[in-house]
Amino acid sequence: MSISYSQSINNDWENQLVTQQNKEKPHATLFYDASGKDVTSLNGVWDFAFYNYVSEIPSNSIPEKWDKIEVPAAWEMQGYGLPIYTNITYPFDKNPPFIGGENGNPVGIYQTEFKVDNIKDKEIYLRFESVSSAFYLWINDKKVGYSQDSWSPAEFNISDYINKGKNVLRMQVFRWCDGSYLEDQDGWRMSGIFRDVYLVEKSKVHIKDYFFTSDLNQNAASFGLEVDLNESDNRKLKNYKLGYELSDNNGKIISKNTESLNAFKSFSDALKDVNRWSNEFPNLYTLKIKLFHKNELIDSIKSKVGFREIAISEKNELLLNGQPFIVKGVNIVEHDPIYGKHIPKDRLEKQVKLLKRYNINTVRTSHYPATPYFYKLCDEYGILVIDEANVESHGMRYGTASLAKDPTWEQAHVERIEAMIHRDKNHPSVIFWSFGNEAGNGVNMVAMQQKAKEIDTSRPTHYHSSEAPISFDTYGGGIWKNGKRHSFGRYQSVNDMIYIGKMNLDKPFLLNEYAHAMGNSIGNLQEYVDVFEQYPNLIGGCLWDWVDQGITRHVDGSYGNKIADIERAHDGCAIPGSDYYWAYGGDFGDTPNDGNFCMNGVMMADLTPSSKSEEVKKAYQEMAFNLIDIESGKIEIKNKYHLTNTNSFDFVWTLLRNGKVQRQERFDLDIMGRSKKTVTLPSWESIKHNGDEYILQISAVLKESTSWANAGYEIAFEEWIIKSDASKKSLNLAFESNPETEASENKFIVGSANTRIIFNKKSGNIESIFKNNNPIVEGGIALSFYRAPIDNDKFLVKSWNSVQLDSLIVKVDAFETEVINGNAIVTIRKTHKGNKRINYIKTVEEFRINNDAEIKNTLSIEFIGNNLPNTLPRIGYEVKLLNNYNRATWYGKGPGSSYRDRSTGMKMGIYSANINELFVNYAKPQSNGNRSEVRWLEIENLINRFKVSSTKPFNFSLQNYDIQDIINAKFTYQLKENQYSILHLDFEHGAIGNGSCGPMPMEKYLLKPSIKTYEMHIKL
C-alpha cells in the first residue's frame, strides 16, 4: 500500500522549523534513577494502542480500547509493527520534511496514571530520557507540548496541568517525523519509549543546571562551578542562599562555600594535590549543591565529578592530562537482542566491564548520545567517551540536497548538539563533542561548532566530513588541505593511514570507524595500532563496532517480549541448528533492509566474546615486549600506560617445549608509566637446541581484583617461537615389508593387517579409509580451493567464482602406482578447470603409504592463466570423516580460531576441543573455525584416532558442515548436520581482511596463486 504525502506544513511532525513546544531547556543530568525523594519512576506497564497510519488515529487521540505494553522498550519488540534494519536508505519516501511511503507512519498512544500527594509550592516535571521519534503530551486531557529528537531528553513542566492525587498521562508517539531525516543511523529502526520516564517534584525555586569545570597545573588544580536556578527574578531570591561541598573518596570535604545569590551563581577554588581522573585511575569527587531558603534546605543535588584536562598539542597530538594519548576505541550502537533500543542497566554495566577487560579505552556513542547511566559507568570505571550528537542524514547524501547545507534545518541541527552538551557536560569521561555522522557538511555544521564552543571550550569537537568549510577540531574521515580535498572517505587502509600520518596536517586525525567487524573479520588490526603509535597526529581509532545487532528469535516467529526464557534463548543462539537464532535485516519482512550488515560486532549479540575480541585485546594492550637475547633471557618491556606502574601486575614467563610447559616462573617488575626497562628473566637457563621447538611466553596478570576483573586476569602477553631444526625435517616414512595392494578397473587399494586405503581411479581421490575394519574416511578426501564466503569476501568472491573455484571440473590426467622400498606410491595428475574459462590448475599428488599405516602426501600445484584471482581462499584437502570423529587435539594457535592476518590474540600450545566447540556460530553462516600455525593434529572418536603433521605449519577446521551446507544457510537455524564430520586440512588458508566495509587484505597476507609444493604426513 502506498501512502501519499500530506504536503501540509500544518503537521508539526512534518515541519523542520517545529522541533518542540513547551519543552524545558536542556540541562545537566541531575539523577540516574528514582532513588531520590523528589524523583519517581513511571517505568512499568502502561496502556497502549497502536495504529499503522496517522489517518487511523481517533480525532480526540483517545483509543476505544487499550492493550498493555512495557515501558521502556521498543514497541516493535512487543508485537506492534516491524523492526526495520536499514543502513542508508530511509524507511520512508525521501521528500523532506514529509513522511510517506509503503511503510506508512505508525503511531502509538500511551497512557498511564500517577499520583501527586502535594502540589502546593511545588514545580512538577515529567522527564522522558528518550522517545522515538516525536510525540505530543497530554496531562488530564490538557495538551502540554510536543517534542522530537529520539535520543535526547524531553522535559516538561506540568505544574499547571496536574491535580492533587490521581493524574492521567497520555502521549501520542509518531514512528517517524521530519526529525527522522536527521536520524538515518545504521541500525534497527524502532519506535516508542526507549529510556526511563520520571516524575520530578521540586520546590518552587530549585536548582536547574550546573557546570563543573577544572583546570590542571602540575599537581594542583582549580575548578569552576556555575549553577542555574529555575527562577530568574532577583527580587524573588532575596532570602535564598546557595552552597556547595566537594568531598574526596574518603568523604573528606576539600572545598565548600555558601553565599546569597541571584538567579545565576558561580563558585571557584584552587586546590592542591588533587587526584586526577583518567581512564587508568578514574578518581571521582562528590559534589553536593544545596539551596537554602531562610536557612532551610529546600533542594540539593549530588553528583560525581572529576579533575581532567583534554587538549591538542602543537604537534596535533591528543593530550590527556598533559600526556599524549592514543584512542583505542570502539563504536557502540545501543541495542539489546530482547528489548531493542532499550538497554537494561545490568547489560550496560556488563558492557563497560568487558570494555575494560579487552583493553578498550574509548567509546564513540554512534551515532547519538547514549543512555545517561552509561556515562555514569564510564566515569566510574574509566572509559573515555566521544559523545556524538543525534545527527545523520546519510540518505540525503552530501551534495546540494544535503540537509547540512539547508539553512531551514539549522535549528534542528543545533538543538541536538546543544541538548547533548548540556546533558553530558559534567562527565569527566567525555573528551570530544562529535557533530554526528555521515550528515554532509555546510552552514549547519558551522552553526553546531559555534554552539558547541559557546557552551563548552574545554573539549575539542570532532566530525568525519572532508568537505569545506572545516568547522571542527579533529579530522575523522577525509581531509581538506591547501584548498584540496583528499578523498580518503571512510575505513582507510593501513597504507592510507601512513600517508595521512606524513601529511603534516593542521589538525589531529581520528579514524573514527575502521576494522569493520562483520562476521569472521578483523584482519591486520595490529598494523593499524602500530601506525597510530608511529605518527603523533594519528590519535587512534574506533572499531566498527562493539556488538552484533541481532534480535533473538525462535523459528516459530516469536521474539522480543514473546521470548519467555531469555537465558535459554541466548544459549540456543550459540548452537548451530538450534530453534533459536540471531535475526537480522529482512527476516521480519522489513523493507527496505540491508540484511546482516548490522551484524558487525566485536562481541556476539548477547555480549559473548569471540576470537575477534581476543585479537582486539591483544592489539590494544598497553604493554610491549621485545626479545633482546634468548640465550641470556633478556627482554625489553615497555609500559605504555600513563600512570599505572607494572607493580600492579604479576608477570609470568613460560617456556614450552614442543607445545608442553617445561618451565614457568612468576616475577615482579617496577616500571613506571611511559617507561621501559630491559630485564633478565629470573631463573632463566639457556636452551639446549636438540631439534625440538621452544616457545617463550610472557604474560602480565592483575595482581589484585578490580571492579571489572578478578586477580589473575591476563591483561597483556607476548610469545616468541624459537626456531629449531624440527620445521626443516623431511617426513620420510619408515619401511619394512611392502604393504599389500589390490587393483581393479576403478579402484586401487593399499592395506596392511589392520588398515585399508581405497583410491578411486576415476575421481583421483582417496575414497575411504578403514582401520580395524572401522571406517575413518567415508566420503573421500578431495583437494579444496574454496571456502564458504565470509562477509569480508564479498568483493573477492566474484573473482573466485569467475574461475569457478566453487565448482571446478576435475580431470584425472594420470593415475600411476608402484611399490618400492616398502612403500606403495600412488601418483595422481589432475587438471582442475571451470567450464567457461581458460584458467586452470594443474596438480600432482603423491601418496607414499607404508605397512605401518603411515601416509606421506606431497602436493605440487601450478595455477595457469591470465585472469587468476589476486588471492585464494584456501589450498588444502576436504576430508569427509565418519560422523562420530568429533574431537581434535592440536599443537598450534589456540584455543580460538585464527588466520594468517588474525592470529596475534591466540597463543601457541596444545589444545583439545570437540567439534561443536570448534564452530563459530556467526549470525549469517560463513567459513569459520580455522586454527592456524598447527604443527600436528590428532582427530579421534571413541574407537580410533589418527594424527596429521607437516613440514610447515598448516591449518585445520573440524565441523559438522561442509562448504555447501554453510553456503545454503542464510540463518543459523538452517544449518543441518552433514552425514560426515568435515575436516579441512589446509596447507594455506586465505586472509580475512576487513573487506565487508573497508580495504582488502594487506598485500603481505594474500594467498597468491603460484607454483607451490607442500608435504603432509598422516599416521592412522
Image (tube, rainbow, N blue to C red):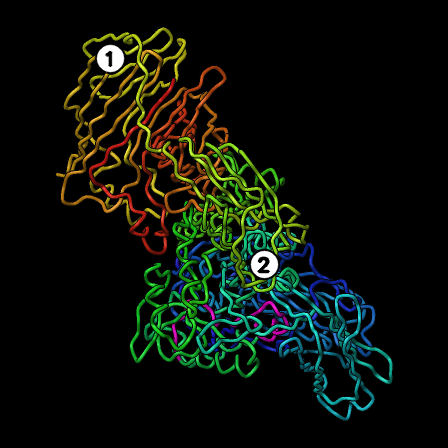
Number of numbered discs present? 2
Q: Is residue 158 above or below residue 735?
A: below
Name the amino acid, label 2: Ile
Could you tell me if residue 68 is visible in this image? no
As drawn, 390 above or below 575: below
Left or right: residue 816 versus residue 380 is left
Q: Which residues are magenta?
A: 420-442
Separation of residues labelled 2 and 1 (CA atoms): 62 Å
As helix, strand or loop, the secondary structure at mark 1 comes to loop
Picture disc at residue 950 = none
Identify the residue under disc 1. Answer: 821
Q: Quick check: 1015 left or right of 265?
A: left
Give the residue displayed 29% in from the left and 9% down from the top.
Answer: 739
Residue at x 48%, y 35% (from the top left corner): 909
Dividing the picture into quarters, in which one does residue 531 lie? bottom left
- Magenta stretch encompasses residue 422: yes
**Residue 1011 counted in the magenta span:** no
Q: Is residue 262 left or right of residue 354?
A: right
Q: Position of residue 590 (x, y in %)?
A: 43, 51
> Quick one: label 2 or label 1, which is nearer the N terminus?
2
- Quadrant assignment for the N terminus: bottom left
Residue placed farthest to the bottom in the image? 235
Res. 860 visible in picture: yes
Which residue occupies the foreground of this view, 228 or 338? 228
- Residue 33, x across and y down, in percent: 71, 62
* Residue tagged 2: 671
Query: Looking at the rendering, in which quadrant would you find the C terminus?
Result: top left
Residue type at mark 1?
A: Asn
User: Percent position (x, y) of residue 143?
Assistant: 64, 73
